[in-house]
């Protein structure tokens, strides 16, 4: 039996993906709870229907041209509809890690989404790198796997998501409606503080319902067997990657830690 892994592709999971998309740690859209998502998803009116994330952001404009107004439907009203549109429009600018988490990629919980956002800085860089890594080889693939806390299982899940054309179509349509905010790149340092909120030794256990094993288990198993020298090599690679993106800067004196 073929397993449904297609992100936005699988109709059986589409409602759950929408619920995840609007959840508190993702887009956090007030007024779009489970009941409302199910109502919009099941609607046969094309000016009310929401079956993909981008359609959340086109609801108001579609309603303007519709004779079947949302405010006239039981359970809604002028005030609640106005507040819903305000809540949706307030999320047209979104933190990068929230966008990545909201995509519902298997094994990518909130902690891993923050790791990816800090590592790539912008959605343009992240999206392009994931597409370039489609062959599971080359610089983009190696760069993804070199991020502290990203194991091969997680890396493969992310790249597989970006290999699916229909996922790319939905993401492209979504980016026409929302603007991801660039994330602050980490300071190029060996300090353990750089690992805050998502480093190799502090990955939280996030066994999300979409992904089976969850993001933390794979990373911890891979991290636990890495010796001191290998850990230093990983830090050097991460530091060089950050320095390359930040441009020339004054290097601090070598403190002898490698």
Image: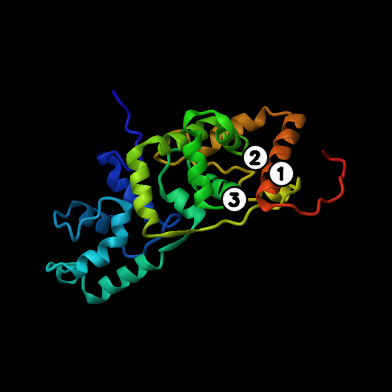
* Residue at the far left in the pictured view: 67
Which residue is identified by label 3? 118
Give residue 240's position: percent from left, percent from top: 71, 42
Crowding near the residue tagged with mark 3, few <14, some 14–19, many ≥20 C-alpha atoms within 10 Å: some
Give residue 157's position: percent from left, percent from top: 46, 34
* For marks 2 and 3 on the same chain, the one whose residue lies earlier in the sequence: 3
Q: Nearer the viewer, mark 1 or mark 2?
A: 1
Label 1 to label 3: alpha-carbon separation = 13 Å
The residue tagged with tag 2: helix, strand or loop? loop
Q: Nearer the viewer, residue 109 or 240?
A: 240
* Residue at the far front in the pictured view: 248
| Residue at left offset 51%, top offset 29% | 136
The residue tagged with tag 1: helix, strand or loop? helix
Which residue is identified by label 1? 239
The residue tagged with tag 3: helix, strand or loop? helix
* For marks 1 and 2 on the same chain, the one whose residue lies earlier in the sequence: 2
User: What scheme was used to colour the molecule?
Assistant: rainbow
Label 2 to label 3: alpha-carbon separation = 14 Å
* Residue at the far bottom in the pictured view: 79
Give residue 228's position: percent from left, percent from top: 76, 31
Dividing the picture into quarters, in which one does residue 27 lie? bottom left
Q: Quadrant of the C terminus?
A: top right
Which residue is identified by label 2? 200
Give residue 98's position: percent from left, percent from top: 47, 54
**Left or right: where 224 falls relative to 179:** right
| Residue at left offset 26%, top offset 67% | 60
């Amino acid at each position: 039996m073929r397993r449904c892994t297609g992100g936005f592709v699988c109709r059986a999971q589409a409602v759950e993906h929408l619920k995840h998309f609007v959840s508190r740690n993702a887009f956090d859209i007030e007024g779009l709870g489970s009941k409302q998502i199910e109502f919009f998803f099941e609607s046969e009116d094309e000016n009310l229907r929401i079956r993909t994330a981008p359609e959340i952001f086109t609801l108001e404009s579609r309603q303007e041209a519709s004779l079947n107004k949302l405010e006239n439907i039981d359970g809604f009203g002028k005030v609640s509809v106005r507040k819903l549109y305000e809540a949706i429009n307030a999320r047209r600018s979104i933190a990068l890690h929230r966008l990545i988490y909201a995509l519902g990629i298997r094994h990518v919980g909130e902690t891993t989404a923050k790791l990816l956002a800090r590592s790539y800085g912008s959605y343009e860089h992240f999206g392009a790198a994931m597409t370039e890594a489609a062959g599971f080889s080359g610089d983009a693939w190696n760069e993804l796997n070199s991020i502290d806390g990203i194991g091969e299982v997680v890396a493969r899940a992310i790249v597989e998501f970006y290999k699916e054309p229909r996922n790319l179509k939905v993401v492209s349509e979504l980016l026409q409606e929302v603007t991801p905010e660039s994330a602050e790149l980490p300071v190029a340092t060996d300090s353990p503080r750089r690992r805050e909120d998502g480093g190799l030794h502090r990955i939280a256990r996030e066994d999300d319902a979409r992904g089976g094993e969850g993001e933390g288990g794979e990373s911890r198993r891979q991290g636990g067997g890495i010796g001191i020298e290998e850990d230093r090599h990983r830090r050097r690679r991460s530091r060089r990657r950050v320095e390359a993106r930040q441009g020339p800067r004054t290097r601090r004196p070598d403190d002898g830690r490698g």
